[in-house]
Image (tube, rainbow, N blue to C red):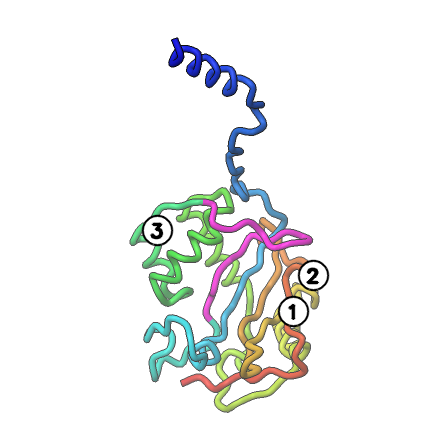
Amino acid sequence: MKRRFLASMLLALLAAIPASAEPKRKKPTASGGKFDYYLLVLSFAPDFCDQPTGNKDPRECGPGRKIGFIVHGLWPQNETSRGPENCGSSPVAPSVIQATLSYIPSESLIQHEWKAHGSCTGMTAADYFSTLRRARDSVKIPPDLDQPSQKVQLSPAEVESKMASANPTFPASAFRTSCYRGNQELQEVRICVTKDLSPRACTQSAGECTLPNVTLLPVK
């Protein structure tokens, strides 16, 4: 009789717990295709290879490679905030990797960019990297930036101005820089394009290097 009474009390208590007390399921942080524009991100290899940390693939950092800018990625971006990231993905097919290695020189970075950014575009991996390659092909890099033979110091505004001059169909505000603050070297040039890859102005969310000058090391 006592056990039956305790069981009845337990059932009554459970029934009294409101539904709102149940654990809430986490909503997805982002869904594919919901963003405003793209950042085409070009990393300056000599300065990246000079950093004390990071995966230094010899195809990017090996002597004699003579590599200046590589494609870091094509990032979905929002007007007032960073774009969605890590929307879930499967490994990139070997055929897509082979077609992209002349733009992004390591398989690991290709896989990372698909997982972190490409998976949030709503495209397949093949279409995403095809779009990435077309975006890169639409941008010219002046030789004195891409292949400096000696150390160069420029302000971020000068880097952006050189990029704008080499790409007259782009608004000057389509170019942004980022930098390594520790040793004041150039990290990236970021180019803003629409979802159909037309040139457009960047917004504040694209970031900006605020150092007075940045160093570009010579290619090796």
Looking at the rendered structure, the secondary structure element under dot 2 is helix
Q: Position of residue 3 (x, y in %)?
A: 38, 14
Q: Position of residue 153 (x, y in %)?
A: 60, 87
Q: Amino acid at mark 1?
A: Glu
Is 115 left or right of 26, judged from the image as shown?
A: left
- Location of the N terminus by quadrant is top left
- Identify the residue at image location x=62%, y=60%: 192
Q: Is residue 73 visible?
A: yes
- Identify the residue at image location x=32%, y=50%: 93
Q: Position of residue 97 (x, y in %)?
A: 34, 57
Looking at the rendered structure, the secondary structure element under dot 3 is loop
- Location of the C terminus by quadrant is bottom left
Residue 57's disc is none
**Residue 86 covered by magenta stretch:** yes
Q: Residue 34: name its quadrant.
A: top right
> How far, Cα to Cα, is label 1 from label 3?
31 Å
Determine crowd level at label 2: few under 14, some 14-19, many 20+ residues with C-alpha closer than 10 A.
Answer: few
Number of marks in picture: 3
Q: Identify the residue under disc 1.
A: 208
Magenta part of the protein: which range?
70-87
Q: Identify the residue under disc 3.
A: 92
Q: Amino acid at mark 2?
A: Gln
Q: Which numbered disc, 2 or 3, marks the residue that appears first in the sequence? A: 3
Q: Above or below — where is 142 with respect to 139?
A: below
Q: Above or below — where is 215 with respect to 135?
A: below
> How far, Cα to Cα, is label 2 from label 3?
32 Å
Q: Which numbered disc, 1 or 3, marks the residue that appears first in the sequence? A: 3
Q: Circles 2 and 1: CB distance less than 8 Å?
A: yes
Instruction: Name the outermost residue toward the front.
Output: 2
